[in-house]
Image (spheres, rainbow, N blue to C red):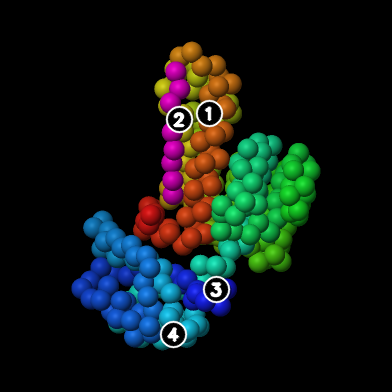
């Protein structure tokens, strides 16, 4: 994936019980394999006693990922480490789901086309046909999968089939207004990112911005999180806010909310694709 004059950039992310010697042993392993660390982040979580580390590095000797993975098993066994190695140049294959609000989808498509996101969008699925033209104009596959309460299981099976066929590693809910089943969430644990307004739990249900406007709310915001079977309660990745005031209309609230939602979702997807996010119980560790 690298040029003829520059070695590739690999990424190592790991978690393990917090203990003396982990950083030293990992660094020594990379030195022994003639790897130059270009970026490093670490965090010890005092609440659960776990240690998290992310290293970006370049293999100056030409060693490949398969060899690194195999040889690292000795270090991993010593410290009960759960580790993953990635090639930073390989884009994360992502499937985007959307309903009738297209601002997040449009933003993802634009950022992807301009190279601002290290992902490959392998298709867009919607339970409405509204954004087929937008999707296809970007050269992306579009699948219209309508759903009712009676056909929900069948529709989810179709989504799963499409995801598997296209090698999707991440599912992005770009204002997809359907609740995914616990079984589906379990299959994709830590690999589905959702975006929603930050009024929860105060303004659940329809027209949250309008009801927030009626209550005189001064901040509108958005939350991106991993999806679990506990609705809108998954580990939070990123949040953003936009200040509003009494002179603004409900439509102004909605417009500001759209902007925040698009930016926050894009950040979450980018950080996931750059392997910057690790799960620590119900929370996330996000390395800058």
Question: Disc 3 vs disc 2: Cβ atoms closer than 8 Å?
Answer: no
Q: Earlier in the sequence, mark 1 or mark 4?
A: 4
Is residue 56 depicted above or below 66 in this figure? above
Question: Disc 1 vs disc 2: Cβ atoms closer than 8 Å?
Answer: yes
Region of the chain picked out in magenta, as a range: 237-245
Q: Earlier in the sequence, mark 4 or mark 3?
A: 3
Which residue lies under the disc numbered 1? 256
Is residue 248 depicted above or below 87 in this figure? above
Image quarter of the C terminus: bottom left
- Kindly identify the residue that appears in the image at 28 percent across and 69 percent down: 17
Q: Gap between marks 1 and 2, in whole Å?
A: 7 Å
Which residue lies under the disc numbered 2? 242
Residue 55 x %, y %? 38, 68
Q: Is residue 240 magenta?
A: yes
Which residue lies under the disc numbered 4? 61
Side of 67 where 27 appears, left or right:
left
Side of 140 where 198 appears, left or right:
left
Q: Pick the residue in front: 199 or 52.
A: 52
- Kindly identify the residue that appears in the image at 65 percent across and 42 percent down: 106
């Amino acid at each position: 994936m690298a040029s003829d004059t520059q070695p590739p950039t690999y990424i190592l992310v790991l978690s393990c019980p917090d203990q003396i010697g982990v950083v030293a042993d990992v660094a020594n392993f990379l030195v022994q394999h003639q790897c130059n660390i270009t970026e490093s982040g670490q965090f010890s979580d005092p609440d659960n006693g776990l240690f998290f580390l992310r290293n970006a590095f370049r293999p100056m000797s030409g060693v490949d990922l398969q060899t690194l993975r195999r040889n690292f098993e000795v270090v991993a066994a010593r410290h009960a480490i759960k580790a993953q190695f990635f090639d930073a140049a390989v884009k994360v294959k992502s499937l985007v789901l959307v309903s009738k609000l297209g601002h997040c989808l449009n933003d993802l498509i634009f950022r992807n086309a301009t190279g601002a996101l290290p992902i490959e969008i392998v298709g867009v699925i919607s339970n409405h046909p509204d954004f087929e033209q937008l999707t296809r104009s970007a050269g992306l596959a579009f699948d219209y999968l309508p759903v009712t309460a009676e056909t929900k299981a069948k529709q989810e099976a179709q989504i799963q089939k499409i995801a598997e066929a296209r090698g999707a590693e991440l599912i992005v809910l770009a204002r997809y207004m359907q609740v995914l089943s616990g079984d589906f969430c379990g299959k994709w644990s830590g690999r589905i990112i959702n975006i929603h307004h930050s009024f929860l739990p105060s303004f659940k249900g329809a027209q949250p911005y309008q009801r927030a406007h009626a209550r005189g709310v001064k901040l509108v915001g958005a939350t991106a999180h991993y999806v679990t079977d506990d609705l809108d309660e998954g580990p939070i990745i990123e949040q953003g806010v936009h200040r509003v005031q009494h002179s603004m209309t409900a439509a102004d609230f909605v417009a500001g909310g759209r902007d925040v939602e698009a930016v926050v979702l894009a950040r979450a997807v980018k950080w996931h694709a750059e392997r910057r996010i690790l799960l620590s119980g119900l929370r996330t560790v996000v390395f800058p």
